[in-house]
């Protein structure tokens, strides 16, 4: 059996988030700068395998989702439908909204915002030859069955399950429309279903179509479900983990145009390595009368050149080490002006000329002054990457490591990659 069917991603967002305990449904809470539902929407929108997206939303909040869809330009979203009273009821409503033409249906918990694109690819690939596919990961905990204590006081262990056979079920849960619809029709016609509901779609298929094998594809430890308040913090941290930047073909820079702003050692190395790759490089530093601390100075220098593919900001902030008490007021202001204000100035001045990406290189250092500047540039990177995403301009940050040469190599790899919003540690000399 082979299938090249249309694939519809269904985002189940009809819950109220009782366990998180906020006044609004948890899928509307912002994590890493975006609502949880928007993270999930963005993954499905960007997946080449997905043709259409249907959202099931908590009654009363559908218009908020329509706003998010319109503002974010999520063109694959065809419908926003009110969810039901339970997850399975929301799935049932989605199935009713899908029409009769056979297709692949990928049912995803909207509150799993860290779904990786390769999981969608694996699911759709598996659906070419299977009619039911689930995403699962091995259990790292021992799972046991609790029973009421014989003396009536609390619970005792009834059984310890064989962990080697246990998997934790994630989403998307994926089916041919005809298969999942038949399973749900049987469930809805079963008067006993309401008393013993299923916790997921695979549970419905397993119970009502036991002859349909549900094939498993590997999920991911990052694909967490935001269920309890702590999960909001865990998701936020997971979003901040740096992406792996592949070592690409730096020759791809040949013929491109770069402006390197600032007089740090890394600035010099980036300029040298990029020029060796065949890029046209313009360097602008205090030696050329350009000071990133002054917006007008950077803006004039950039206005004098033409459009530019990449701008790299790598100012020198000399001496941002040690305890705050030992830092003189002037040094403090200079460091903040060079690193934080300089990045803001350069970003603002570069924007009208930029074609591809901005890279903010944070100078080396330690202590309260340096670390607070570094955090400011990291936050700037993430926020700007979101602001400029709609225009296709990437923004990244690299923290200078112990080797300026390796940091410059990492910088070039970031320029030729497609990552955005990433804060990456530059190269460190091997010990
Ligand atoms: N009536 C419902 C209930 C849940 N869901 C969706 O199913 C996913 C997984 O459910 P869960 O984590 O249980 O979400 P809530 O039901 O919102 O949480 P809680 O049980 O704490 O209220 C979520 O994306 C949720 O929005 C749904 O579409 N319709
Ligand atoms: C579908 C699911 O996410 C798979 O792990 C899970 O069953 C949903 O359960 P919940 O009761 O809706 O949190």
Image (cartoon, rainbow, N blue to C red):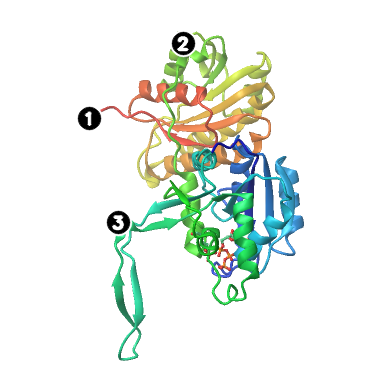
Instruction: Report the front residue among 52 and 26.
Output: 52
Of residues 393 and 329, the one drawn nearer to the viewer in this rendering:
393
First reached walking from the N terminus: tag 3 or tag 2: 3
Q: Alpha-carbon neighbours of circle 3 within 10 Å: few (<14), some, or many (≥20)? A: few
What element does badge 3 sit on? helix
Instruction: Quickly name the residue at label 3.
Output: 164
- Residue bearing mark 1: 431
Residue 407 appears anywhere in the view: yes
- Tell me: 53 left or right of 129: right
Tell me: residue 364, above or below residue 237. Answer: above
Q: Residue at x 51, y 22 (%)?
A: 416
From the image, state whether disc 2 or disc 1 is nearer to you.
Answer: 2
Q: Disc 3 or disc 2, which is closer to the eye?
A: 3
Decide if residue 147 is on the left or right side of residue 62: left
Q: Could you say which is closer to the camera, residue 70 or residue 204?
A: 204
Residue 298, percent from left and from top: 62, 23
For mark 2, give the secondary structure: loop
Name the N-terminal-most of marks 2 and 1: 2
Q: Is mark 3 within 8 Å of ligand 2?
A: no
Where is residue 274 shown, x and y percent of the image?
47, 14
Instruction: Tell me if mark 2 has few (under 14), some (14-19) or many (20+) residues whose alpha carbon lies within 10 angstroms of its own.
Output: some
Q: Ligand 1 shows up in which quadrant of the image?
A: bottom right
Q: Which residue is mark 2?
A: 277
Residue 278 coordinates in the image, percent (x, y): 50, 8
Q: Residues within 10 Å of mark 1 (few under 14, many from 20)?
A: few
Spatial CA distance of label 3 from label 1 is: 39 Å
**Mark 3 to mark 2: distance in Å?**
51 Å
């Amino acid at each position: 059996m082979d299938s090249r069917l249309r694939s519809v991603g269904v985002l189940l967002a009809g819950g109220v988030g009782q366990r998180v305990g906020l006044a609004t449904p948890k899928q509307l809470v912002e994590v890493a700068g975006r609502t949880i539902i928007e993270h999930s929407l963005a993954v499905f929108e960007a997946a080449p395998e997905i043709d259409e997206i249907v959202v099931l939303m908590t009654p009363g909040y559908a218009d908020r989702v329509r706003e998010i869809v319109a503002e974010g330009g999520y063109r694959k979203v065809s419908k926003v439908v009110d969810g039901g009273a339970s997850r399975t009821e929301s799935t049932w409503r989605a199935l009713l909204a899908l029409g009769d033409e056979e297709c692949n249906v990928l049912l995803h918990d909207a509150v799993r915002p860290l779904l990786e694109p390769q999981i969608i690819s694996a699911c759709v690939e598996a659906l070419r030859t299977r009619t039911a596919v689930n995403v699962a990961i091995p259990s790292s905990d021992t799972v046991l069955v609790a029973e009421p204590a014989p003396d009536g006081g609390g619970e005792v262990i009834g059984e310890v399950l064989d962990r080697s056979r246990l998997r934790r079920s994630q989403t998307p849960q994926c089916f041919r429309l005809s298969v999942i619809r038949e399973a749900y029709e049987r469930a809805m016609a079963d008067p006993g279903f309401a008393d013993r509901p299923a916790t997921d779609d695979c549970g419905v298929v397993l119970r009502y179509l036991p002859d349909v094998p549900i094939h498993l594809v590997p999920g991911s430890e990052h694909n967490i479900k935001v269920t309890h308040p702590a999960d909001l913090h865990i998701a936020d941290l997971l979003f901040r983990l740096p992406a792996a930047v592949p070592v690409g073909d730096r020759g791809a820079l040949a013929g491109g145009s770069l402006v390197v702003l600032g007089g740090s050692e890394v600035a010099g190395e980036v300029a040298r390595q990029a020029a060796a790759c065949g890029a046209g490089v313009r360097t602008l530093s205090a030696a050329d009368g350009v000071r990133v601390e002054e917006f007008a100075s950077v803006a004039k220098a950039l206005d004098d050149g033409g459009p530019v593919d990449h701008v790299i900001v790598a100012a020198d902030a000399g001496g941002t080490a040690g305890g705050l008490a030992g830092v003189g007021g002037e040094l403090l202001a200079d460091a903040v002006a060079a690193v934080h204000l300089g990045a803001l100035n350069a970003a603002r001045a570069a924007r009208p000329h930029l074609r591809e990406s901005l890279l903010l290189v944070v100078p080396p250092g330690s202590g309260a002054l340096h670390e607070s500047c570094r955090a400011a540039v990291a936050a700037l990177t993430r926020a700007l990457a979101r602001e400029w995403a709609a225009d296709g301009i990437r923004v990244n940050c690299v923290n200078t490591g112990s080797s300026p040469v390796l940091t410059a190599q990492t910088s070039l790899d970031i320029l030729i990659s497609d990552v955005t919003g990433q804060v990456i540690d530059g190269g460190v000399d091997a010990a």
